[in-house]
């Protein structure tokens, strides 16, 4: 769990000053990850660290490709030299492979950061896609609608969200079902 405070501090250093709204979103995602971490057992620290770090690629000094999951994961791998699974979670969070394809970065993302399967990616998607840009909890439907409104129809983010929508919803529903069973 010592990785979690480090992840929080790194995200704060990279996002809080230059991108206060992105930092507010990150704080909300991390709060949600902490509240559901019990469902991933021994990987609780990994989930919480990924929640803190999932959007660091937006930091102005980390932008390389302009695709935040890839830029953030490369920074974690190349500069911070963190665990491969954490890098892969950041690189692929919330079905980033869909957007990578729309940006012509799919091969790079897949080659450098293989997707992670299992409960943790679903949990991270749930945390990210049920937290609005200001860090408030929202439904996945509200969040998807908000993203589509924020980005124009021609934007790769908009196209990717429309394409990944069923997967995002299925991911969040799997986590909500687990939470209902765990907290009847």
Image (cartoon, rainbow, N blue to C red):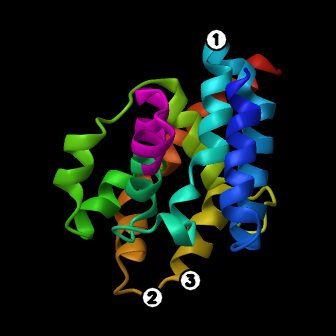
Nearer to the camera, 174 or 51:
51
Query: Mark 3 sits on what residue?
Result: 149
Instruction: Mark 3 or mark 1: name the one nearer the start of the chain.
Output: 1
Nearer to the camera, 82 or 45:
82
**Percent of width and height locating residue 12:** 74, 55
Left or right: 28 in relation to 92: right
Circle 2 sits in a helix, a strand or a loop, which is it? Answer: loop
Q: Can residue 135 be seen in this view?
A: yes
Magenta residues span 75-90
Query: Mark 1 sits on what residue?
Result: 42
Circle 1 sits in a helix, a strand or a loop, which is it? Answer: helix
Query: Mark 2 sits on what residue?
Result: 152
Residue plotted at (72% across, 25% down): 37
Quarter of the image with the N terminus is: top right
**Percent of width and height locating residue 139:** 70, 56
- Whether the magenta-drawn stretch holds residue 9 is answered as no
Circle 3 sits in a helix, a strand or a loop, which is it? Answer: helix
Mark 2: few/some/many CA within 10 Å (<14, 14-19, 20+): few
């Amino acid at each position: 769990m010592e990785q979690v405070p480090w992840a929080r501090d790194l995200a704060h250093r990279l996002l809080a000053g230059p991108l206060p709204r992105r930092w507010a979103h990150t704080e909300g995602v991390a709060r949600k990850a902490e509240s559901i971490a019990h469902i991933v057992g021994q990987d609780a620290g990994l989930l919480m660290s990924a929640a803190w770090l999932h959007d660091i690629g937006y930091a102005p000094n980390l932008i390389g490709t302009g695709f935040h999951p890839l830029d953030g994961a490369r920074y974690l791998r190349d500069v911070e030299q963190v665990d491969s699974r954490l890098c892969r979670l950041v690189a692929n969070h919330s079905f980033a492979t869909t957007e990578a394809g729309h940006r012509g970065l799919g091969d790079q993302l897949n080659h450098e950061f293989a997707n992670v399967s299992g409960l943790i990616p679903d949990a991270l998607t749930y945390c990210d896609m049920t937290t609005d840009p200001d860090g408030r909890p929202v439904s996945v439907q509200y969040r998807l609608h908000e993203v589509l409104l924020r980005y124009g129809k021609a934007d790769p983010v908009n196209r990717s969200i429309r394409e990944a929508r069923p997967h995002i919803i299925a991911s969040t529903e799997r986590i909500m079902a687990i939470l209902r069973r765990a907290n009847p």
